[in-house]
Image: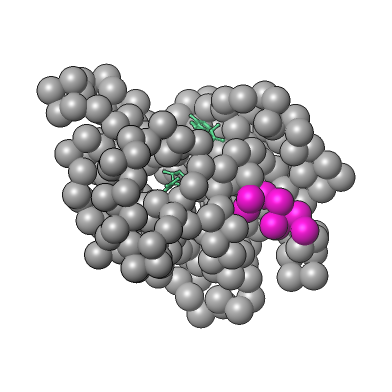
Amino acid sequence: MEFQDKVVLVTGGTRGIGRQISLDFANEGAIVIANYYHDDNSASSLISDNIDVYKADISSEEEVKKMIDDIISKYKKIDILVNNAGISNDSLFEDKTKDSFMKILEVNLVGAFLVSKYAFKYMENGSIINISSTNGIDTNYIYSLDYDASKAGLISLSANLSKLSSKVRVNTICPGWVDTDMNKDMDLEFKNEELSKIMLNRFGTCKEISNVCLFLASSKASYVNNAIIRVDGGKR
Ligand code: NAD
């Protein structure tokens, strides 16, 4: 199996896209630590022989440091890190505040920085995959300007991290619309408008994002570094 005995940390790994990534790595023989912050029930339902869950707020330096220390004392190494945890806050421009903007940055961008920083020194011949968004490339939505900025920042963070060490490849996935809880309250009219912009005429599945993530972490992608891959069904 491709990931036999590899230690994989997936942030936000117990729900949505992250949950699928955790399950797929585990099915390929990896030992997975699925970090999460919300929803203890979905986390405990994921625990299995080779999936452990770890509750920590990735925007807290203290909690991230402790999480990495605990993982290293238990598993001795980290081979693959997937910075997947993310939050959004669609709201009117005039309703956004400094605090609400900072909260998005702290989780989506600073959180990915902190986990990468503390994990990096334990990674040898490893791989980091950052889950950004097409919103980080195409800034089309005034309602999510804070989220879009955080995802653009994550693309920039990936580029810099990819130049840190020849032993750690760092790549970015930019999903378009994916069917997860993040979009569960979407207005139907807006959803239809968005669907009309997608060549494949549907939202993506968590599996379709996870497939690309596992490819990037695998030996098949051994010469792929600092790549940005859109997985959006061909969004216009
Ligand atoms: P989701 O809301 O279903 O899951 C997000 C996960 O992040 C949850 O497990 C949550 O506990 C975790 N999380 C949130 N804040 C955290 C924190 N402070 N510390 C630790 N964990 C935290 O979301 P999803 O749709 O599966 O999205 C996963 C990633 O994919 C996100 O980064 C998101 O921005 C990105 N993305 C999603 C879509 C989409 O359409 N769903 C599109 C593009 C990009």
Residue lying at 27% horizontally and 60% vertically, measured from the top left: 197
Q: Extreme left residue here?
A: 94
**Residue 216: image location, x then y, percent:** 55, 68
**Residue 178: image location, x then y, percent:** 46, 51
- Side of 123 relative to 83 (left or right): right
Residue 66 falls in which quadrant of the image?
top right
Can residue 210 be seen here?
no
Residue in the foreground of this view, choosing between 209 and 52: 209
Residue 95 falls in which quadrant of the image?
top left
| Residue interval drawn in magenta | 20-27
Main secondary structure type of the part rendered in magenta = helix
Q: Is residue 85 above or below residue 232?
A: above
Quarter of the image where the N terminus is located: bottom right
Count of numbered labels shown in the rendering = 0
Q: Is residue 46 above or below residue 162?
A: above
Q: Is residue 189 above or below residue 214?
A: above
